[in-house]
Amino acid sequence: MSEERTGVATVGGNPITLIGPELKAGDKAPEFTVNKDLMEEASLSDYGDKIKLISVVPSLDTKVCDAQTRRFNEAAAELGDQVAVLTISVDLPFAQSRFCTVAGIENLDTLSDYKLHSFGKSYGVLIKELQLDMRSIFILDKNNTIRYVQYLKEMTEHPDYDAALSAVKTLL
């Protein structure tokens, strides 16, 4: 049974339970399996020795998630090919693909945690009550050591974009 954490996050002011450990800077990033589409899977190791900016959103069909994904898509274009920018949600791959097409998202990978919740459980962001992943940011260095992490306390708030991008730039 996975660890459950209470009293650390809310959705619309209502307390929620997060499943999985609270990771910290300096921790080795856990491996995970997510879906690129319905059949093809992806894992942390697929991104090799790139710096990874992992942007976690509950659903691309919300205003804050949309804005977060667009912001990191713009940043990805400027960060270069040493950085892999990943957006992970539990949206079905069909919905992720549609969102990217409509929003013009071309510089990052959208990955779905819908099937196994492997990412959510490993990174401590799976919301027990909703089966969504809680908004958060993880920056991993080339050796998959976590160098920056932000777990949002309230799902509807924006992450600290500038702090996350600054953390990436210090690794370049």
Image (cartoon, grey):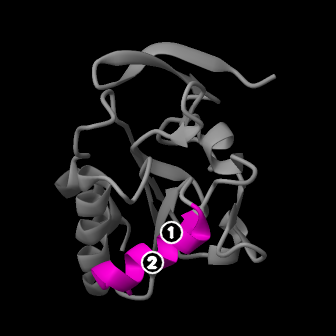
Describe the element under mark 2 as helix, strand or loop. helix
* Side of 100 where 48 appears, left or right: right
Vertical position of residue 149 compared to residue 91: above or below: above
- Residue drawn at 25 percent across, 84 percent down: 78
List the residue tagged with mark 2.
Answer: 98
Q: Position of residue 40 (x, y in %)?
A: 75, 77
Q: Position of residue 92 (x, y in %)?
A: 59, 63
- Residue drawn at 49 percent across, 70 percent down: 96
Q: Which residues are magenta?
A: 92-111
* Side of 84 where 93 appears, left or right: right
Kind of residue at disc 1: Ala
Q: Is residue 161 visible?
A: yes
Residue that sits furthest to the right in the current view: 1
Residue density around tag 1, few if under 14, some if 14–19, many if 20 or more, within 10 Å: some
In the image shown, does 172 or 68 lie closer to the viewer? 68
Residue that sits furthest to the left in the current view: 162
Kind of residue at disc 2: Arg
Image marks 2 and 1: residues in contact by CB distance under 8 Å: yes
Q: In the rendered structure, does residue 127 fall within the stretch colored magenta?
A: no
* Side of 13 where 5 appears, left or right: right
- Residue drawn at 51 percent across, 13 percent down: 6
In the image shown, does 49 or 52 lie closer to the viewer? 52
Describe the element under mark 1 as helix, strand or loop. helix
Disc 2 from disc 1: Cα separation: 5 Å
Vertical position of residue 26 compared to residue 113: above or below: above
List the residue tagged with mark 1.
Answer: 95
